[in-house]
Image (tube, rainbow, N blue to C red):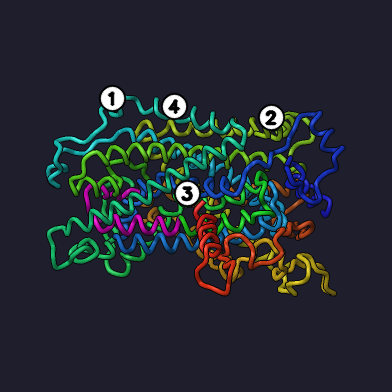
């Protein structure tokens, strides 16, 4: 049993070609022998700024721009802000758990490795497959993401406002549409998007990081501009109600919260939930919608094996905190300011379906421009949404290919001979630039699900796959939070002058108080428990609308099928490794390994990056202190 665990861990740790090697990696002669047979090594080429923007860009896609309007309709403008804050805090807590473990052990495929180490090897294996499939469908959790983003890209070209609506809001133009998009088959845009996504992911990881850095900077600038524009529009226009002032759409007759109106899948019945019940079910539906747009939170940890500044610049710690602060604050501000200018019951926001892929005319940002008579900007924002969906699809393929490459390194679950062994060897291989080309190509093929969005009925299927992927990723977050709770039992708060690893009569532990401990997320045990409980509740009530009369079998399966699939994958792992294994005799197989942790090079916690340093503490103002402040601001912005 111990040997099997070691085999699993070696598969995760021993395959990274880096400027600064992992402790415990294979010997130089073994690496040379591996290269002669075909490289299987990733390259450590990403710097801190690359990691920051890759993580940020992965969370800014169709969810914020096209789905936020649906969230406003489901729960109202105030409820939408509340829902984004709750989901942001939930995923921040889960991501911090993964971030701390990754900072200490920057391994390849961290969500796989840590679940296998601290929960069960079968759980780690299943989590890896659930996350990979999701990243490729949205992304079966990351296969589906690229397909969904490409579908959104194609649907965004179908940009057209109803002339009657334009007249009702006194828009200065008679029509607002993209004729070339309306007259072009969506399959053309899907195909072009898929080709661009593939080509970018075949570049060396350093070049990929630079492209994502530019993408992230563009997104950050545009989102900031959106917030400022909404404030300006609201200041310019009081909506004709001087008593309510700038918060007209947050007050009666509109309201801070909205009632929840649900249409059954056949469209025969409409259910309206009011008062406290309406707010509760509306908030629940909104949070499930929001989760879809925030799945890229753990991108920071996926990049660890290609991050060259893991111990020097504390990039894992800073990137984990930056993505949480940026995403939560920016998402909440965008929704809050847009809610000042757009009523939640606007006809273009109304969406009672469980799943759908929205278009540019359904974006609350564009609707705010139209309702305020702004010309030109709706076209710009719609073009930006296309760019945003494309860049998020690029990121989705990157994540899924790295997850698949890590899965190929799990030696004891692949056949030793035959076609299974050949597939494993091909998926492990990387080219001369360290890119796992075969893993990229296989992951990319699943993105062809994006062609489902070309017709209405297949698009509904893709929407249900998105719901499936949401449940898949919730399971992943449940497992990573649980693995941290198990990991926490192997730590203690020792003396700051002691090392990261300390020995006691009870065994060897990680010292979280050590001055060179890379990332101590405060109150993390409680935050991990909060993330675990929150994600578990979201899984349980994910498909509540499928139980409305008449019962929807398709929506029920979309909401809950991921759970039995996860359990089956766990069982298959154990059956493959232990032919006589029985579920009722299940014993956790985990190594609980804490060997070879990474220690940060900066021993003084007060001098680490991300902290504000006063060079001259004898005075408040000096040029040295001013430059120190500028450097501190830059660390958190870049």
Which of disc 4 and disc 2 is earlier in sequence?
4
Mark pair 2, 3: CA separation? 28 Å
Q: Position of residue 235 (x, y in %)?
A: 22, 58
Question: What mark, if any, has residue 59 been given in the picture?
Answer: 3
Q: Is residue 465 visible?
A: yes
Mark pair 3, 1: CA separation? 31 Å
Q: Is residue 342 visible?
A: no
Which of disc 1 and disc 2 is earlier in sequence?
1
Q: Residues within 10 Å of mark 4 (few under 14, many from 20)?
A: few
**Residue 439 forms part of the magenta stretch:** no
Mark pair 2, 1: CA separation? 41 Å
Q: Position of residue 547 (x, y in %)?
A: 39, 56
Instruction: Report the front residue among 581 and 603.
Output: 603
Which of disc 4 and disc 1 is earlier in sequence?
1
On screen, residue 242 above or below 419: below
| Contact flag, marks 1 and 4 (Cβ < 8 Å) | no
Q: Please give the range of residues in magenta.
A: 327-354
Residue position for label 1: 183
Question: What mark, if any, has residue 192 been given in the picture?
Answer: 4
On screen, residue 308 above or below 243: above
């Amino acid at each position: 049993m111990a040997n099997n665990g070691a085999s699993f861990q070696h598969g995760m740790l021993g395959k990274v070609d880096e400027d600064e090697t992992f402790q415990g990696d294979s010997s130089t002669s073994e690496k040379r022998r591996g290269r002669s047979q075909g490289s299987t090594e990733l390259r450590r080429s990403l710097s801190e700024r690359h990691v920051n923007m890759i993580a940020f860009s992965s969370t800014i896609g169709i969810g914020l721009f096209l789905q936020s309007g649906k969230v406003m309709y489901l729960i109202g403008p105030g409820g939408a802000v509340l829902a984004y804050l709750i989901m942001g805090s939930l995923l921040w807590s889960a991501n911090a758990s993964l971030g701390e473990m990754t900072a200490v052990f920057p391994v390849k495929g961290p969500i796989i490795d840590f679940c296998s180490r601290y929960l069960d090897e079968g759980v780690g294996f299943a989590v890896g497959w659930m996350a990979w499939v999701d990243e490729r469908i949205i992304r079966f959790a990351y296969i589906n993401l690229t397909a969904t983003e490409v579908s959104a890209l194609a649907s965004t070209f179908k940009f057209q406002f109803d002339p009657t609506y334009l007249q009702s809001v006194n828009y200065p133009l008679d029509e607002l549409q993209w004729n070339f998009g309306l007259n072009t088959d969506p399959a053309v845009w899907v195909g072009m998007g898929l080709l661009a996504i593939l080509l970018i992911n075949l570049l060396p990881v350093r070049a990929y990081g630079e492209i994502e850095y530019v993408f992230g900077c563009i997104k950050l600038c545009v989102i900031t501009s959106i917030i400022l524009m909404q404030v300006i529009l609201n200041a310019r226009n009081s909506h004709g109600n001087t008593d309510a002032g700038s918060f007209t759409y947050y007050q009666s007759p509109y309201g801070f919260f909205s009632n929840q109106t649900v249409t059954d899948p056949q469209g025969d019945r409409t259910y309206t939930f009011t008062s406290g019940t309406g707010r509760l079910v509306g908030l629940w539906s909104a949070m499930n919608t929001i989760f879809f747009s925030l799945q890229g939170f753990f991108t920071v940890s996926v990049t660890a094996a290609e991050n060259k500044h893991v111990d020097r610049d504390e990039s894992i710690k800073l990137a984990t905190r930056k993505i949480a602060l940026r995403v939560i604050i920016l998402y909440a501000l965008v929704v809050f300011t847009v809610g000042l200018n757009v009523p939640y019951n606007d006809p273009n926001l109304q969406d009672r379906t469980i799943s759908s892929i929205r278009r540019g005319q359904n974006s609350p940002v564009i609707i705010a421009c139209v309702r305020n008579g702004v010309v030109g900007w709706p076209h710009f924002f719609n073009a930006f949404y296309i760019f945003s969906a494309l860049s998020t699809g690029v990121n989705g393929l990157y994540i899924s290919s790295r997850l698949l490459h890590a899965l190929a390194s799990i030696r004891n679950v692949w056949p030793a001979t035959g076609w299974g062994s050949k597939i494993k060897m091909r998926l492990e291989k990387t080219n001369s630039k360290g890119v796992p080309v075969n893993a990229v190509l296989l992951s990319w093929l699943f993105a062809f699900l994006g062609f489902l969005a070309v017709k209405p009925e297949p698009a509904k299927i893709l929407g249900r796959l998105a719901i499936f992927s949401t449940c898949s990723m919730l399971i992943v977050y449940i497992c990573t939070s649980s693995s941290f709770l198990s990991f926490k039992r192997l730590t203690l708060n020792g003396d700051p002058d002691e090392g990261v690893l300390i020995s006691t009569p009870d065994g060897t532990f990680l010292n979280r108080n050590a001055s060179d401990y890379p990332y101590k997320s405060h109150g993390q045990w409680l935050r991990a428990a909060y993330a675990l409980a929150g994600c578990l509740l979201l899984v349980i009530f994910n498909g509540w609308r499928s139980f409305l009369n008449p019962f929807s079998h398709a929506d029920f399966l979309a909401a809950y099928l991921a759970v039995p699939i996860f359990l089956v994958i766990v069982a298959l792992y154990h059956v493959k490794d232990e032919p006589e294994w029985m579920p009722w005799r299940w014993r956790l197989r985990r190594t609980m390994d804490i060997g070879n942790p990474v220690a940060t090079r900066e021993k003084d916690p007060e001098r680490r990056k991300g902290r504000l340093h006063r060079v001259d503490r004898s005075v408040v103002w000096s040029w040295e202190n001013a430059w120190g402040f500028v450097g501190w601001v830059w660390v958190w912005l870049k």
